[in-house]
Amino acid sequence: MTTLSATQPAPPFADAKAAIAAAVDAARTEILDLSHRIHANPEPAFEEVRAATWIAEMLARHGFEVDHPAGRLATAIRAVRRGGRGGPGPRVGILAEYDALPGLGHGCGHNTMAASGVGAAIALAAIADSLPGEVVFLGTPAEERGSGKQFMIDDGLFEGIDAALLYHPCDRNHVETHPLASEDVDVVFTGLQAHASSDPWMGRNALDALISLFTSVGLWRQQLRPTARVHGIVREGGTAANIIPDRASAWFMIRSDDETEYVKMRDRFRAMCEAAALATDTSVEVTFSGGARTMRNNGVLAERFRNNMAAYGIADQGDDPNAGSTDMANVSWVCPTIHPDLAIADEGTPGHSILFRDAAATPRADETTLLAAMLVAQTAYELFADPELVAAAWREFRGEA
């Protein structure tokens, strides 16, 4: 495995960045062990007990003051390493995700995100005596469902943060991402049981309502913009073929690249649910949760990350043509934020798949995890070393640049 410190970092502050690379190299066994343990022990949203514990323990060993849990979420973490220079300085947020996908495991590679975030934090801790301000690590649960970062924002855990940095694994390398606004929707239809053969007319079929809703969504897609998405799965559809189902439920997701358009889609979807209930003489309960917003990429921070990765021979491949959603976008409305992607698999490997899950535990993923830790830490260092860079990022955030 090639050492990161074998390559000369990009200016400015090349000497300090070289020290960061050396710190990541020194901790590589610890960083990759964390990635592999989280990968081997997948935990879904809000249930990341082992991952959060391992991360909190690792940060404490490297001199961080750790709050775990942080805020209302039992698996959220906020850890602080104060700089040794004294005086004013920025608070730079280093983020990590660690939830898995139900039934699939780490098909989004969050194990690499957790390990790289911790790696970046401990690399900065290694040079903390030369830093002003604070390194603030934020362990963020429930990205795949529930938007844990929004809970943490509401709990005040992002207050005072001057920048938020988080890498995501991908099949391509690109610095700016354009995720879709999104919400989870739980839909439950309630009807009335009856014998499906002897007296079906006595029942009210909740499954028929759900099938009607899926049919409506399928027809709706023809009129949706190319950048909009609606997709769902059936969670419950009855208990036996000879019983009219009195309960049927589904989990949908609604997405759009335009928040104004998204609100219209949300209202239309609710109306479809109500129409399906009316058509089948059932009742319906529609619950929206876990809202993710569109992303405000901070160009000042993106340019610094792009410059740092170029020194290691990695070119920005431009916008990702395949957009999902992330609650990191919610953070981008709170402070200057970037969410660059780095490849852990060959181009064309689909996310949220067995192929991507398996790729997240390969030597290539390990190399990317270490690289991401270093690049995030190097970009963070520039913010600590250059107050004007922080000011420029905030001017862009406020629309003043």
Image: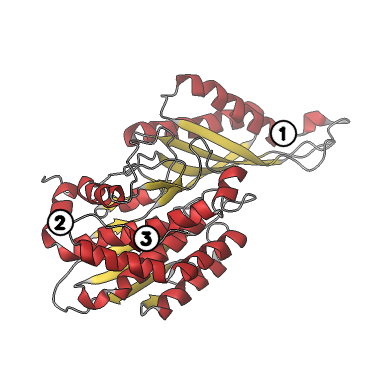
Residue 58: quadrant of the picture: bottom left
Residue 4: mark: 3
Front in this rendered view, residue 333 or 252: 333
Residue 388: mark: none
From the image, tell me which residue sits under label 2: 389
Closer to the chain start, of discs 1 and 2, is 1
Residue type at mark 3 is Leu
* Secondary element type, mark 3: helix
Whole-number angstrom distance, CA of label 3 to CA of label 1 = 65 Å
Measuring 69% from the left and 30% from the top, which residue is drawn there? Answer: 208
Residue 204: mark: 1
Front in this rendered view, residue 267 or 137: 137
* Secondary element type, mark 2: helix
Location of residue 125 in the rendering, given as x and y in whole percent from the top left corner: 32, 74
Measuring 23% from the left and 67% from the top, which residue is drawn there? Answer: 16
Location of residue 376 in the rendering, given as x and y in whole percent from the top left corner: 32, 58
Eyeballing the image, is 176 above or below 8? above
Q: Nearer the viewer, mark 2 or mark 3?
A: 3
Whole-number angstrom distance, CA of label 2 to CA of label 3 = 25 Å
State whether residue 151 appears in this view.
no
Residue type at mark 2 is Leu
Residue 82: quadrant of the picture: bottom left
Measuring 16% from the left and 79% from the top, which residue is drawn there? Answer: 86
Q: Nearer the viewer, mark 1 or mark 2?
A: 2
Residue type at mark 1 is Arg
Closer to the chain start, of discs 3 and 1, is 3
